[in-house]
Amino acid sequence: MKFLTGRVSHQLDAKNRIRIPAKYKNAFPDGEKLYFFEYNAGRIAVMPESVISEKMKVFDSVTPGDEDAMDAMAKLFSSMEEVAEDPQGRVQIPKQFREYAAIQKDVITVGMGTYIEIWAQEVFDARIGGKTMQEVNASLYKKSDSKA
């Protein structure tokens, strides 16, 4: 799988459908199922099954007696839905995901390395658009320093 980067602005159609931009769609493994996923607050992730499987390995050692971990698994897995593409290559974003990401019409799709995120354009602009690279670097290094 290619490393997914960049961003593409586009719009929902009247039936709440988009086309996953070709630069991302063509980078996903051929024939692998894709899933909508409420992975990060206020945006929808679209991940191939192999990426989800890798991220979910953290649950391999969970036992049914660990209620908190079982609740976390239930929340995560119930926050996913398979992406269904129509014959014209469009995917309908289900209502729960549009509401979760506050998507009305204008969207931006962002490459996130191994998956993509779909944002409401206005949410992206408010949260990310005004950040400088210096702010981003300071935030990243501050977080990595606190883990040491």
Image (tube, helix red, strand yellow):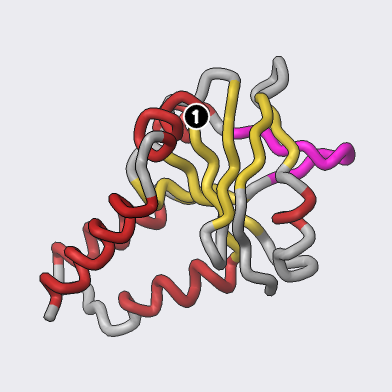
The quarter of the rendered structure image containing the C terminus is: bottom left
Magenta segment, principal secondary structure? loop
> Residue at 56% across / 32% down in the picture?
94
Q: Residue at x 47, y 50 (%)?
A: 37
The answer to whether residue 76 is left or right of residue 2 is left
- Asked whether, in this view, residue 82 is left or right of residue 39, the answer is right
Question: Residue 69: x and y, percent?
Answer: 20, 67
- Using the image, determine if residue 68 lies above or below residue 19: below
Q: Which residues are magenta?
A: 84-93
Q: Which residue is mark 1?
A: 120
Query: Which residue ends up furthest to the right in the rendered image?
Result: 87
Residue 76: quarter of image: bottom left
SS for tag 1?
strand
Looking at the image, which residue sits at the far top?
Answer: 14
Identified by mark 1, the residue type is Ala
Camera-nearest residue between 103 and 129: 129
Q: Does residue 26 lie above or below 55 as drawn?
A: above
